[in-house]
């Protein structure tokens, strides 16, 4: 199943409707996504993967952070929540951990046990746009829907 089909199938299990919008142009970065959608860069809910040293089970410790496209993750704040020193995952690592390709990494239908942190910066907007599993997609979503769909925790891990 393609990443796009995976997201669409997952959305069918939700008690509310979400749609994946597809674009002819790339949305692989926050700036490109904002341009395609005609919104502020901050309204792009970028999904980032951070990893740490392998735990006792020899699997790398990992976490997904969803935050505004116009802010940066403060790894010191993130470490306080995690208990390990986080390192930004490269594209291959992110793909391996989430099942989504670089530019399309999204917070939906992630493997069990992969924690999701939703940064409070997203609360600035009534509607944000997350990737839909491809590098030319976007999903309009509220922060409350994002928390529900990801099972994520609301936290403050970014610089403003």
Image (spheres, helix red, strand yellow):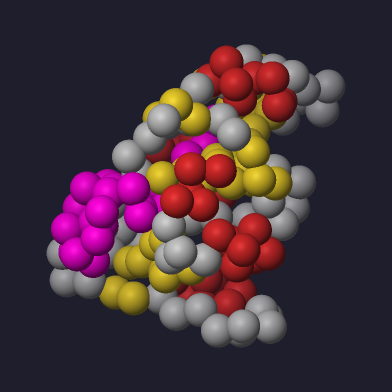
Q: In the image, residue 12 lies at what x, y percent?
A: 61, 84
Question: Residue at horizontal 26%, vertical 54%?
Answer: 40
> Is 61 placed left or right of 159 in the picture?
right
Determine if the magenta segment contains residue 93. no
Q: Residue at x 68, y 83 (%)?
A: 15
The image quadrant of residue 68 is top left
Q: Is residue 33 magenta?
A: yes
Query: Can you give x and y, in whole percent of width and height, for residue 116 in the image?
Result: 64, 46
**Picture quarter with the C terminus:** top left
Query: Can residue 56 be seen in this snapshot?
Result: yes
The answer to whether 17 is drawn above or below residue 70 in the figure is below
**Residue at screen point 48% across, 55% down:** 106
Instruction: Give the magenta part as a residue range.
Output: 29-50
- From where the camera sits, is residue 95 visible? no
Determine whether, in the image, residue 36 is placed left or right of residue 65: left
> Residue 65, position in %: x, y?
55, 40
Taking 21 as reference, is 128 left or right? Answer: right
């Amino acid at each position: 199943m393609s990443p796009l089909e995976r997201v669409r199938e997952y959305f069918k299990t939700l008690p509310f409707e979400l749609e994946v919008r597809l674009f002819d142009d790339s949305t692989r970065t926050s700036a490109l996504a904002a341009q395609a959608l005609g919104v502020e860069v901050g309204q792009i809910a970028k999904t980032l993967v951070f990893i740490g040293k392998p735990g006792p089970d020899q699997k790398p410790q990992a976490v997904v952070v969803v935050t505004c496209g116009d802010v940066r993750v403060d790894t010191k704040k993130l470490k306080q929540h995690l208990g390990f020193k986080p390192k930004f995952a490269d594209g291959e690592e992110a793909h391996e951990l989430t099942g989504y390709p670089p530019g399309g990494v999204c917070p939906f239908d992630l493997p069990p046990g992969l924690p999701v942190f939703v940064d409070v910066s997203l609360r600035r907007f009534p509607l944000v746009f997350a990737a839909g599993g491809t590098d030319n997609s976007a999903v309009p979503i509220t922060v409350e829907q994002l928390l529900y769909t990801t099972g994520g925790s609301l936290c403050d891990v970014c610089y403003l």
